[in-house]
Amino acid sequence: MTEPTGRRERKKAQTRQSLADAALELFLERGYDQVGVKDVADYADVSVTTLFKHFSGKEALVFDQDDDLEAALVAAVCERPPDQSIPQALREHLLLKQTQFAVHTTDPRFADFTRLVQETPALRDYAQRMWTRHEAALTRAIAEAVGAPEDDVSCAALARFSLEARSLILRHADPRRAADEAFALLEHGWAASHPSV
């Protein structure tokens, strides 16, 4: 996440982070369904109104880094090395950024966080909707990278299937193998229609 520059922006960012941290702690401790937004607001020592100024709902508290997700997906395509195909770049991005939510993969709470999301239907569904919401931006980035029109079906298909592959990868016992297999299919099809990228 980019660092806010002014005092007001820093204060807002601190409040947002405090709410996200409080939510994560409470959700991991008590379970998502046993914690209400008032509990989170009280724990972070803010009003419920303040909570809703920063987050659209309870699920959004868990996925507090959603703002950076779309930019990272687009960057994976636009900033890839010249010898790397678009499917390869997206595969690497998905493996390195299996989640961009409240907990990084190096955080000791990562396994608990992942289990919380996967075992809570509302969170699992929200995560999938959040992820695929960025399909249009990814499609535009792919189209721009290959010099195709924004409505190019092959670019849209690659964006959609890459984003959908994430849930298969996360559910698989061996995420790397799942990513290799899914993206081998995407690579083959992409190479057939766009041999130079």
Image (spheres, rainbow, N blue to C red):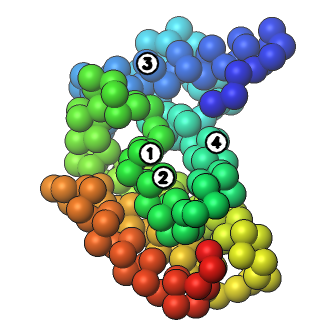
Secondary structure at badge 1 equals: loop
Residue at the bottom extreme of this rendering: 192
Report whether residue 106 is seen: yes
Three-letter code, disc 2? His
Which residue, given by chain and number where applicable, does mark 4 sit on? 67
- Location of the C terminus by quadrant is bottom right
Earlier sequence position, callout 2 versus callout 4? 4
Q: Residues within 10 Å of mark 1 (few under 14, many from 20)?
A: some
Earlier sequence position, callout 4 versus callout 3? 3
Observer-nearest of 82 and 91:
82
Three-letter code, disc 1? Lys
Earlier sequence position, callout 4 versus callout 1? 4
Which residue, given by chain and number where applicable, does mark 1 sit on? 97
- Give the CA distance from mark 2 to mark 3: 28 Å
Above or below 92: residue 150: below
Looking at the image, which residue is at 73% across and 14% down?
Answer: 10
Which residue, given by chain and number where applicable, does mark 2 sit on? 93
Earlier sequence position, callout 2 versus callout 3? 3
Q: Residues within 10 Å of mark 3 (few under 14, many from 20)?
A: many
Secondary structure at badge 4 equals: helix
Which residue, given by chain and number where applicable, does mark 3 sit on? 22
